[in-house]
Amino acid sequence: MNSMRLMAATAALLAASAAACAAPTAKEIRGASTYVEIDNEPPPKLFVDQPLPEGLAIGIVWIQYRVENLRIVPVFGAGATRVSPRVGHLHITVDDLPWWWADASDNNTIDIAGLPVGEHTVRIELVNPNHKIYETRVVKFNLPVAVQHEFHKSGTGHH
């Protein structure tokens, strides 16, 4: 009888071990805990997709992104550069215009509307709290239609 119990216990342990190995850990998915300082943090990484076709079809540019080894938060200044795990935000430039905007929302999608039909370029920079660039990604696309919302068509100044 002890042999059967041992076999059942071993089988249960093996099943639990296999199940635990199959699912990635929280740290593997979400990154380091915000409660523990990280020694020798790996460099930040920025991953950017092409615009979603569903948005382009209605004249809106939706570009999804994700980052690794950095948390996107609205925290700025010299003190923020010493935070661990690392923090930062995005700078976004459209069509090489001389201005850009900062995005510290971390909602995983850049949303741009009101562009004219045609070829466009969006530059996305992952930056530290003092705006030093870690990585840059450039997305080029063709916008087949202009946005079709009353707000943009009226020309009456009613906003």
Image: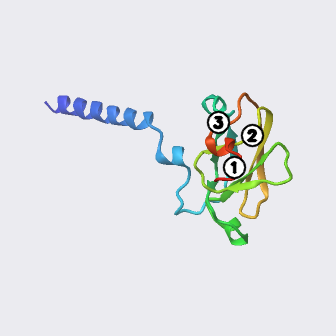
Q: Quadrant of residue 3?
A: top left
**Residue for point 31% across, 36% down:** 13
49 lies above or below 130: above
At label 3, the amino acid type is Gln
Helix, strand or loop at mark 3: loop
**Residue for point 56% across, 50% down:** 31
**Residue for point 70% across, 65% down:** 81
110 lies above or below 140: below
Q: Residues within 10 Å of mark 1 (few under 14, many from 20)?
A: few
Q: Position of residue 36 (x, y in %)?
A: 54, 62
Which residue, as the protein is rendered here, is positioned at the far left? 1
At label 2, the amino acid type is Leu
- In the image shown, does 137 or 151 lie closer to the viewer? 151
At label 1, the amino acid type is Thr
Q: Position of residue 50 (x, y in %)?
A: 69, 33
Q: Is residue 34 left or right of residue 147?
A: left
Give the label, 3 or 2, closer to the camera. Answer: 3
Q: Quadrant of residue 144?
A: top right
Q: What is the spatial separation of the Cα atoms under label 3 and label 2, in whole angstroms?
A: 11 Å
Q: Which residue is mark 2?
A: 115
Q: What is the spatial separation of the Cα atoms under label 3 and label 1, in whole angstroms?
A: 16 Å
Q: Position of residue 68 (x, y in %)?
A: 63, 47
Which residue, as the protein is rendered here, is positioned at the far front? 156
Mark 3 vs 1, N-terminal side: 3
Residue 40 seen: no
Residue 61 seen: yes
Q: Which residue is mark 1?
A: 156
Helix, strand or loop at mark 1: loop
Give the label, 1 or 2, closer to the camera. Answer: 1
Q: Quadrant of the N terminus?
A: top left
Q: Position of residue 63 (x, y in %)?
A: 66, 39
Q: Which residue is mark 3?
A: 148
